[in-house]
Image (cartoon, rainbow, N blue to C red):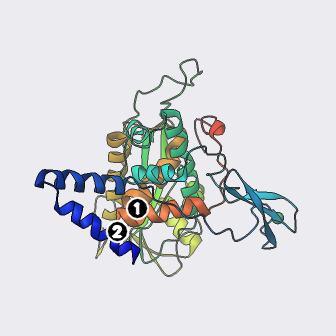
């Protein structure tokens, strides 16, 4: 009753305002409402991150964070233990905003501005999120019509320190290599895609791939009853024989075989190059595997941006991934 009474008084006061004051009042109300911070619920801890036991208990709160104690291994943990969120000093809402920026493919500088974090943090977060995303992509198995083809880029040492002793002069941005005149300077990335937007890609070797190189990336990741479509490179014939797949081969100088072609995987390559050389102005080879999963999830997977944001944010909170800031730049220049 009291509430109704107060609202009536407010209404009366509002009615007494001039039109101009009414407008001003309403705009102030809406802006103060949007300033109310959205509260992100703590995630449900289902098992001890140290030993996977479900026998754990709550063990008090410190700095607003719930502590847990495992009854089996006797180790303490918090909600963030074992995930990339562990040790992050920013509020989780900032990380959620960062995930949005990544789905929008914003530059590091723009991500840093929007989230009000420094560039080094923006860089570390990007790669921690992508390290976690690797785990999602490891689960992908391609089914249905599966197209495979490899793509190449020259080795790029972008972001290496000036004093770093390079094995060869750096390309400023890295360039797209052609299949003709393949040299050992060219990083080979075998790619498999299906028609539903699932994809697999990883650096395998330098130069033209043999069947072992293809195995490293595609081995065991193509469903038995799928139709495997590739060009005439012999390594694919060996691969499909080894894996017992139904193989459709596109003859040399042809672009299709019956109803089958490799247009979807070629389109994947084209959009990958747009992402790497257009959107991100070139990426170092040491981080290329991360940009491949970025491309797989953000560009190639068939879902709305909004869904991808929810899925990615949820995934990084719930996935065991202990990527650490100081280790990110220490990765090998050539991850093969
Ligand atoms: Zn435990």
Residue 43 image position (x, y, % from top left): 61, 65
Is residue 331 shown to the viewer in this render? no
Looking at the figure, which quarter contains the N terminus?
bottom left
Residue 58 image position (x, y, % from top left): 77, 66
Q: Tell me which residue sits at (53%, 44%) in the image.
A: 125
Instruction: Count neighbours of disc 2 (C-alpha within 10 A) and say few if under 14, some if 14 to 19, many if 20 or more.
Output: few
Q: Nearer the viewer, residue 94 or 127?
A: 94
Q: Tell me which residue sits at (45%, 64%) in the image.
A: 310
Give the side of residue 249 with respect to residue 20, left or right: right
Give the side of residue 10 with respect to residue 178, left or right: left
Residue 323 image position (x, y, % from top left): 64, 47
- In the rendered structure, find residue 123 and report the number of the disc placed on it: none
Residue 324 image position (x, y, % from top left): 65, 43
Q: Tell me which residue sits at (28%, 76%) in the image.
A: 259
Give the side of residue 223 with respect to residue 78, left or right: left
Residue at the farthest top position:
163
Instruction: Count neighbours of disc 1 (C-alpha within 10 A) and say few if under 14, some if 14 to 19, many if 20 or more.
Output: some
**The quarter of the picture showing ligand 1:** bottom right
Q: How far apart are labels 2 and 1 at the CA level? A: 79 Å
Label 2, ligand 1: CB separation under 8 Å: no
Which of the two marks, 2 or 1, is nearer to us in this view? 2
Residue at the farthest bottom position:
225
- Can you identify the residue that label 2 sits on? 6
Label 1, ligand 1: CB separation under 8 Å: no
SS type, badge 2: helix
SS type, badge 1: loop
* Location of residue 230 with respect to 34 vertically, above or below: below
Q: Of marks 2 and 1, which one's residue comes earlier in the chain?
A: 2
- Can you identify the residue that label 1 sits on? 232
* Location of residue 81 with respect to 327 vertically, above or below: below
Is residue 193 shown to the viewer in this render? yes
């Amino acid at each position: 009753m009291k509430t109704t009474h107060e609202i009536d008084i407010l209404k009366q006061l509002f009615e007494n305002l001039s039109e101009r004051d009414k407008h001003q009042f309403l705009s102030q109300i809406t802006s103060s409402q949007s300033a109310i911070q959205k509260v992100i619920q703590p995630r449900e801890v289902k098992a001890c991150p140290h030993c996977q036991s479900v026998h754990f208990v709550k063990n008090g709160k410190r700095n607003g964070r719930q502590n847990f104690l495992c009854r089996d291994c006797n180790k303490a943990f918090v909600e963030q233990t074992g995930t990339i969120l562990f040790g992050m000093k920013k509020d989780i809402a900032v990380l959620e905003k960062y995930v949005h920026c990544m789905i929008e493919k914003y530059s590091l500088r723009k991500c840093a501005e929007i989230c009000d974090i420094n560039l080094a943090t923006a860089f570390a977060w990007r790669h921690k999120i992508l390290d976690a995303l690797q785990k999602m992509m490891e689960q992908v198995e391609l089914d249905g019509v599966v197209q495979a083809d490899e793509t190449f880029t020259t080795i790029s040492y972008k972001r290496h320190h000036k004093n770093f002793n390079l094995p060869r002069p750096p390309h400023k941005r890295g360039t797209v290599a052609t299949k003709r005149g393949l040299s050992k300077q060219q990083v080979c990335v075998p790619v498999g895609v299906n028609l539903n937007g699932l994809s697999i890609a990883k650096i395998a070797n330098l130069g033209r791939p043999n069947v072992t190189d293809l195995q490293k990336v595609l081995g065991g990741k193509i469903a038995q009853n799928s139709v495997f479509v590739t060009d005439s490179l012999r390594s694919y014939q060996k691969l499909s024989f080894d894996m017992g797949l139904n193989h459709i081969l596109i003859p040399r100088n042809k672009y299709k075989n019956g109803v089958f072609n490799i247009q979807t995987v070629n389109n994947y390559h084209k959009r990958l190059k747009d992402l790497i050389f257009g959107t991100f102005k070139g990426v170092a080879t040491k981080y290329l595997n991360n940009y491949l999963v970025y491309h797989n999830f953000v560009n190639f997977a068939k879902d709305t941006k909004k869904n991808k944001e929810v899925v990615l944010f949820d995934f990084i909170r719930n996935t065991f991934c202990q990527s650490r800031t100081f280790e990110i730049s220490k990765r090998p220049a050539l991850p093969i």
